[in-house]
Image: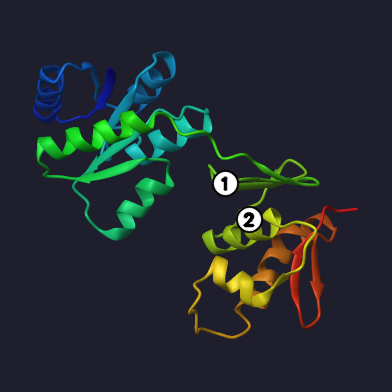
Protein backbone atom coordinates (compact mmCIF):
# COMPACT_ATOMS: atom_id res chain seq x y z
CA UNK A 1 0.00 0.00 0.00
CA UNK A 2 1.36 3.40 -0.99
CA UNK A 3 0.63 6.47 1.17
CA UNK A 4 1.25 10.14 0.40
CA UNK A 5 1.94 12.16 3.56
CA UNK A 6 1.50 15.93 3.15
CA UNK A 7 3.00 17.68 6.18
CA UNK A 8 5.21 20.78 6.30
CA UNK A 9 6.49 20.23 9.87
CA UNK A 10 9.60 18.13 9.30
CA UNK A 11 9.53 16.45 12.71
CA UNK A 12 5.92 15.36 12.27
CA UNK A 13 6.54 14.27 8.68
CA UNK A 14 9.49 12.10 9.75
CA UNK A 15 7.49 10.56 12.60
CA UNK A 16 4.59 9.73 10.32
CA UNK A 17 6.89 8.27 7.71
CA UNK A 18 8.75 6.09 10.24
CA UNK A 19 5.55 4.90 11.83
CA UNK A 20 3.81 4.06 8.56
CA UNK A 21 6.87 2.35 7.09
CA UNK A 22 7.17 0.25 10.25
CA UNK A 23 3.64 -0.95 9.50
CA UNK A 24 4.66 -2.01 6.00
CA UNK A 25 3.41 0.97 4.01
CA UNK A 26 5.38 2.60 1.22
CA UNK A 27 5.46 6.33 2.02
CA UNK A 28 6.15 9.50 0.04
CA UNK A 29 6.30 12.83 1.92
CA UNK A 30 5.82 16.36 0.59
CA UNK A 31 5.47 19.67 2.40
CA UNK A 32 3.41 22.04 0.24
CA UNK A 33 -0.06 22.12 -1.28
CA UNK A 34 1.33 22.44 -4.80
CA UNK A 35 3.57 19.40 -4.36
CA UNK A 36 0.66 17.46 -2.90
CA UNK A 37 -1.52 18.11 -5.95
CA UNK A 38 1.34 17.30 -8.32
CA UNK A 39 2.28 14.01 -6.66
CA UNK A 40 -1.31 12.90 -6.14
CA UNK A 41 -2.18 13.48 -9.78
CA UNK A 42 1.03 12.12 -11.29
CA UNK A 43 1.44 9.04 -9.08
CA UNK A 44 -1.09 6.50 -7.87
CA UNK A 45 -1.52 6.34 -4.09
CA UNK A 46 -3.85 4.21 -2.00
CA UNK A 47 -4.47 7.00 0.52
CA UNK A 48 -3.36 10.53 1.41
CA UNK A 49 -2.61 11.81 4.91
CA UNK A 50 -3.08 15.56 4.53
CA UNK A 51 -2.31 18.37 6.98
CA UNK A 52 -4.56 21.43 6.76
CA UNK A 53 -1.94 24.14 7.37
CA UNK A 54 0.49 24.14 4.44
CA UNK A 55 2.66 26.70 2.64
CA UNK A 56 1.07 28.13 -0.47
CA UNK A 57 -2.49 26.86 -0.39
CA UNK A 58 -3.95 24.80 2.43
CA UNK A 59 -5.23 21.25 2.71
CA UNK A 60 -8.81 22.28 1.96
CA UNK A 61 -7.71 23.66 -1.39
CA UNK A 62 -5.63 20.53 -2.08
CA UNK A 63 -8.77 18.42 -1.58
CA UNK A 64 -10.88 20.66 -3.76
CA UNK A 65 -8.35 20.58 -6.60
CA UNK A 66 -8.00 16.80 -6.44
CA UNK A 67 -11.75 16.19 -6.40
CA UNK A 68 -12.36 18.65 -9.25
CA UNK A 69 -9.74 16.71 -11.24
CA UNK A 70 -11.70 13.48 -10.57
CA UNK A 71 -9.03 12.18 -8.19
CA UNK A 72 -10.88 10.38 -5.39
CA UNK A 73 -7.98 8.83 -3.50
CA UNK A 74 -9.11 8.52 0.16
CA UNK A 75 -7.94 11.52 2.21
CA UNK A 76 -7.37 11.56 5.97
CA UNK A 77 -7.09 15.21 6.99
CA UNK A 78 -4.95 16.27 9.97
CA UNK A 79 -5.45 19.53 11.81
CA UNK A 80 -4.97 21.24 15.14
CA UNK A 81 -8.32 22.99 14.62
CA UNK A 82 -11.03 21.20 16.56
CA UNK A 83 -14.02 23.47 15.95
CA UNK A 84 -17.06 21.90 14.33
CA UNK A 85 -16.90 24.50 11.55
CA UNK A 86 -13.36 23.41 10.69
CA UNK A 87 -14.32 19.74 10.56
CA UNK A 88 -17.25 20.59 8.31
CA UNK A 89 -14.97 22.64 6.04
CA UNK A 90 -12.61 19.69 5.73
CA UNK A 91 -15.32 17.20 4.86
CA UNK A 92 -17.03 19.63 2.48
CA UNK A 93 -13.75 20.15 0.63
CA UNK A 94 -13.67 16.42 -0.14
CA UNK A 95 -11.80 14.80 2.75
CA UNK A 96 -13.00 11.34 3.77
CA UNK A 97 -12.04 11.55 7.45
CA UNK A 98 -10.69 14.08 9.92
CA UNK A 99 -8.20 13.63 12.78
CA UNK A 100 -7.40 16.35 15.32
CA UNK A 101 -3.85 16.94 16.56
CA UNK A 102 -2.46 15.74 18.88
CA UNK A 103 -3.57 12.19 18.13
CA UNK A 104 -2.50 8.69 19.05
CA UNK A 105 -0.66 7.03 16.17
CA UNK A 106 -2.77 3.91 16.72
CA UNK A 107 -5.91 5.92 15.96
CA UNK A 108 -4.38 7.25 12.76
CA UNK A 109 -3.58 3.69 11.70
CA UNK A 110 -7.13 2.54 12.48
CA UNK A 111 -8.69 5.38 10.49
CA UNK A 112 -6.28 4.79 7.62
CA UNK A 113 -7.13 1.07 7.53
CA UNK A 114 -10.83 1.94 7.39
CA UNK A 115 -10.25 4.29 4.44
CA UNK A 116 -8.15 1.71 2.61
CA UNK A 117 -10.87 -0.91 3.03
CA UNK A 118 -13.38 1.53 1.62
CA UNK A 119 -11.22 2.47 -1.37
CA UNK A 120 -11.71 5.52 -3.64
CA UNK A 121 -15.21 6.94 -3.53
CA UNK A 122 -17.03 7.26 -6.80
CA UNK A 123 -17.83 10.79 -7.85
CA UNK A 124 -21.47 11.71 -7.31
CA UNK A 125 -23.07 12.05 -10.76
CA UNK A 126 -23.94 15.50 -11.98
CA UNK A 127 -27.63 16.41 -12.12
CA UNK A 128 -28.70 17.98 -15.41
CA UNK A 129 -31.93 19.89 -15.93
CA UNK A 130 -31.95 21.46 -19.37
CA UNK A 131 -29.05 23.95 -19.43
CA UNK A 132 -28.61 23.74 -15.65
CA UNK A 133 -25.79 21.49 -14.40
CA UNK A 134 -25.52 20.72 -10.69
CA UNK A 135 -22.34 19.07 -9.40
CA UNK A 136 -22.89 17.68 -5.86
CA UNK A 137 -19.22 16.73 -5.50
CA UNK A 138 -17.94 20.29 -5.95
CA UNK A 139 -21.13 22.06 -4.82
CA UNK A 140 -21.13 24.02 -8.07
CA UNK A 141 -23.91 25.09 -10.43
CA UNK A 142 -23.82 26.39 -13.97
CA UNK A 143 -26.56 27.55 -16.31
CA UNK A 144 -25.83 27.79 -20.01
CA UNK A 145 -22.17 27.36 -19.08
CA UNK A 146 -22.21 30.35 -16.69
CA UNK A 147 -21.27 29.82 -13.04
CA UNK A 148 -24.13 30.47 -10.60
CA UNK A 149 -22.95 31.28 -7.08
CA UNK A 150 -25.32 29.77 -4.50
CA UNK A 151 -25.22 29.68 -0.72
CA UNK A 152 -25.09 26.20 0.87
CA UNK A 153 -28.84 26.32 1.66
CA UNK A 154 -29.73 27.57 -1.82
CA UNK A 155 -27.64 24.75 -3.29
CA UNK A 156 -29.38 22.16 -1.08
CA UNK A 157 -32.79 23.44 -2.16
CA UNK A 158 -31.88 23.40 -5.85
CA UNK A 159 -30.33 19.92 -5.57
CA UNK A 160 -33.47 18.57 -3.90
CA UNK A 161 -35.78 20.03 -6.55
CA UNK A 162 -33.49 18.85 -9.36
CA UNK A 163 -33.46 15.33 -7.93
CA UNK A 164 -37.26 15.36 -8.35
CA UNK A 165 -37.45 17.43 -11.53
CA UNK A 166 -40.83 17.34 -13.20
CA UNK A 167 -42.55 16.81 -9.85
CA UNK A 168 -44.14 19.38 -7.56
CA UNK A 169 -42.67 19.03 -4.07
CA UNK A 170 -44.73 20.07 -1.07
CA UNK A 171 -43.35 22.79 1.19
CA UNK A 172 -43.34 20.42 4.17
CA UNK A 173 -41.26 17.85 2.25
CA UNK A 174 -38.84 20.56 1.16
CA UNK A 175 -38.37 21.74 4.73
CA UNK A 176 -37.86 18.17 5.96
CA UNK A 177 -35.11 17.54 3.40
CA UNK A 178 -33.41 20.93 3.13
CA UNK A 179 -33.82 22.19 6.69
CA UNK A 180 -34.79 19.81 9.51
CA UNK A 181 -37.95 17.87 10.19
CA UNK A 182 -38.60 19.89 13.36
CA UNK A 183 -37.73 23.27 11.82
CA UNK A 184 -39.80 25.95 13.57
CA UNK A 185 -38.37 29.11 12.06
CA UNK A 186 -40.11 31.55 9.73
CA UNK A 187 -43.12 29.88 8.13
CA UNK A 188 -42.40 31.22 4.63
CA UNK A 189 -38.75 30.13 4.57
CA UNK A 190 -39.27 27.99 1.43
CA UNK A 191 -40.87 30.89 -0.47
CA UNK A 192 -38.03 33.19 0.58
CA UNK A 193 -35.35 30.82 -0.71
CA UNK A 194 -37.27 30.11 -3.89
CA UNK A 195 -37.13 33.87 -4.42
CA UNK A 196 -33.36 33.82 -3.94
CA UNK A 197 -32.99 31.00 -6.48
CA UNK A 198 -35.18 32.79 -9.02
CA UNK A 199 -33.02 35.92 -8.80
CA UNK A 200 -29.90 33.87 -9.52
CA UNK A 201 -31.18 31.17 -11.88
CA UNK A 202 -33.98 32.89 -13.79
CA UNK A 203 -33.64 36.68 -13.83
CA UNK A 204 -30.16 36.88 -15.45
CA UNK A 205 -31.16 34.31 -18.10
CA UNK A 206 -34.70 35.62 -18.73
CA UNK A 207 -36.08 32.12 -18.56
CA UNK A 208 -38.22 30.40 -15.92
CA UNK A 209 -37.26 26.99 -14.54
CA UNK A 210 -39.00 26.93 -11.15
CA UNK A 211 -42.69 26.04 -11.26
CA UNK A 212 -44.99 27.02 -8.42
CA UNK A 213 -48.37 25.49 -7.64
CA UNK A 214 -50.45 27.62 -5.31
CA UNK A 215 -51.18 25.90 -2.03
CA UNK A 216 -48.93 22.93 -2.87
CA UNK A 217 -45.27 23.75 -3.46
CA UNK A 218 -42.54 24.02 -6.08
CA UNK A 219 -40.85 22.02 -8.80
CA UNK A 220 -37.94 22.34 -11.22
CA UNK A 221 -38.52 21.91 -14.94
CA UNK A 222 -36.12 22.16 -17.90
CA UNK A 223 -36.37 25.56 -19.60
CA UNK A 224 -38.43 25.56 -22.77
Q: Secondary structure at mark 2?
A: helix
Contact (Cβ within 8 Å) of mark 2 with mark 1: yes
In the image, taking residue 42 as reference, residue 175 lies left or right, namely: right
- 186 shown above or below 143: below
- Can residue 136 be seen at all in this image of the molecule? yes
Tag 2 residue? 159
In front of the other: 100 or 113: 113
**Spatial CA span between label 2 and label 1:** 8 Å
- Can residue 58 be seen at all in this image of the molecule? no
Few, some or many C-alpha atoms within 10 Å of disc 2 (few <14, some 14-19, many ≥20)? Answer: many
Q: Which mark is residue 136?
A: 1
Q: Quadrant of the N terminus?
A: top left
- x and y percent of residue 44 in the render? 39, 16
In the image, taking residue 67 as reference, residue 76 lies left or right, namely: left
Few, some or many C-alpha atoms within 10 Å of disc 1 (few <14, some 14-19, many ≥20)? Answer: some
Q: Secondary structure at mark 1?
A: loop
Which residue is rendered at x = 38% and y = 47% of the image? 91
- x and y percent of residue 104 in the render? 9, 40
Amino acid sequence: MRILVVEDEEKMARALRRGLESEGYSVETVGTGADAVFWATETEFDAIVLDVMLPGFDGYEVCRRLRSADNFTPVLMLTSRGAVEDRIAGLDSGADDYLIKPFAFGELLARLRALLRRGPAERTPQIVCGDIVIDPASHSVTRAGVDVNLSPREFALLEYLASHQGEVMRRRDIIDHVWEWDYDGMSNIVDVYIGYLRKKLETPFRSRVIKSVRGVGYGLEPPK
